[in-house]
Image: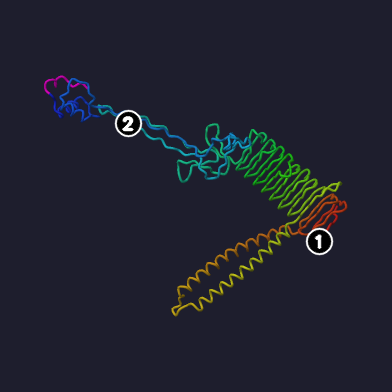
Amino acid sequence: MLVPGKYKHKYPTINSLQKYLKDQGIVYGLKSETLEQMVKQKICDSKICIAEGKPPETGIAGKLEILIDISRIGKPKEFEDGSVDHKDLKKIINVQKGEKLVKKIPAKPGLPGYSIFGEKIDVGIPKEAELNPGIGTEISKDNMNILVASLNGAVFINKDGLIEVKNTEIITGDIDYSTGNLSFSGDLKILGSIRAGFSVSADGSLFIKGNVEDTNVTSFGDMEIKGGAVGTKSSKIICRGELKIHHVEHFIINAEKSVTIKGNAIHSTIKTNEFFKASKILGGSINSSYGVEAEEIGSASEIKTTIQIGSNFLLIQQQNAYKEKLSEYWKASSELKENIFVIVKHGMNAKGHLFQDDFLKYEELKKEIFKIKIQINILERKLIDIENKISMNPNPLLNANTIYPNTIIRFGLVEKVIKVILHNVCIQSIDNRIIIRQKPN
């Protein structure tokens, strides 16, 4: 600033200089040290910055931070040696209910500026990010700035850029190199086939319209395979619900509920905790808790085929083991109570209190009795469960239109090898004897 000419021959004081500036409307950002220096050094008719305004500070817009790693979607897994697994493409990101998905980072407001005349220079309000819940998501009850999954499922980003969590997914093609291995936290529908070497797992139900080749398939719900499953001895189907399939060959199958095969079961190892039904069973082994029904079992060429029916004998064995263990616990509990009685009888003083050492022993014995009581309760619940299972299916049956020789039939520990062709038979175990009857017309 150029000091006015009226001070040319008479130097101002600091007060008069400040007054002059105020009269000119300069009230903000005065540099006191510079003014003092001007007065001391009698500086005038020079350009010196004696006041400076403050520029406004722009705010920072709000933003959304994705808390799950989506960087690997569609990319093959890389190993330390630089090689990649093209079957592991991470096409689907599974999340659990309550898992954090997105964090809202609030906008940071800016600061206004001021001119040397004290005029306020406003700054615009930064835009806030919007945390919009999509399908299967919700705002966290613990933090309004966090978006969480409201169900178990897989993460998807819709056309509007919103994150969604779905527990049902449809794959329109095959499971192959274009998809990689698939693991989904929900119900999964595959409209194509599962090619050899590509595994599929669903936490819910699984529907496959095509075929299953040599691979491993798992479902924690019901599973339906419209086509067939043809693999090798190491191929596996694990189903925690009911399994329906057209035909199966060279597969290992474990199902919690019933297995229904519309066509044939060929050289496969199949176990179900409920019923098994197939058109034809050729080779391999079938293990069914509740019973087996088939049109044909074995073949005219007498291929070895094993049918094992009924889990009651295993349940009864387990039941007896539990009862024996329960008796041991009751005996141990009685002995501990007797020890407590002895301590109380001989260790109590005249005031009815136990001495310190006896009191510690008394408390320790009580803890042991409590632990045993917990084990007794667990065993009693298990025994009730076993009794219910036995009562549900007391007499499992094998029904078949034709059974060929070299078919081995087992009911528990009782076994019978079929040596002649049987037609229209119903087979069951009575008093540890396998009884073969003709089916009623």
Q: Which residues are magenta?
A: 1-10
**Residue shown at 55% from the left, 41% from the top:** 136
The residue lying furthest to the right in this view is 420
Vertical side of 295 occupied by 431: above or below: below
Disc 1 is placed on an element classified as strand
In x, y percent, where is residue 251? 73, 44
What main secondary structure does the magenta stretch of the protein show? loop
Select label 1 or label 2 by which is in front: 1
Image position of 361 with respect to 99: above or below: below
User: Pointer 1: residues within 10 angstroms few (<14), some, or many (20+)?
Assistant: few
Residue type, mark 2 in image: Pro
Identify the image quadrant of residue 8.
Answer: top left
Residue at point 76% right, 56% down? 396
Quarter where residue 129 is shown: top left
Q: Which residue is mark 1?
A: 433
Q: Secondary structure at mark 2?
A: loop
Identify the residue under disc 2.
112
Q: Position of residue 38 (x, y in %)?
A: 18, 26
Return the x and y of residue 437 as percentages of the image width and height: 84, 56
Task: Provide residue 99's location: percent of width, then percent of height.
Answer: 52, 44
Q: Quadrant of the N terminus?
A: top left
Label 1 or label 2, whichever comes before in sequence order: 2
Amino acid type, callout 1: Arg
Q: Within the magenta stretch, is there residue 9?
A: yes
Foreground residue among 144 and 340: 340
Q: Quadrant of residue 393?
A: bottom right
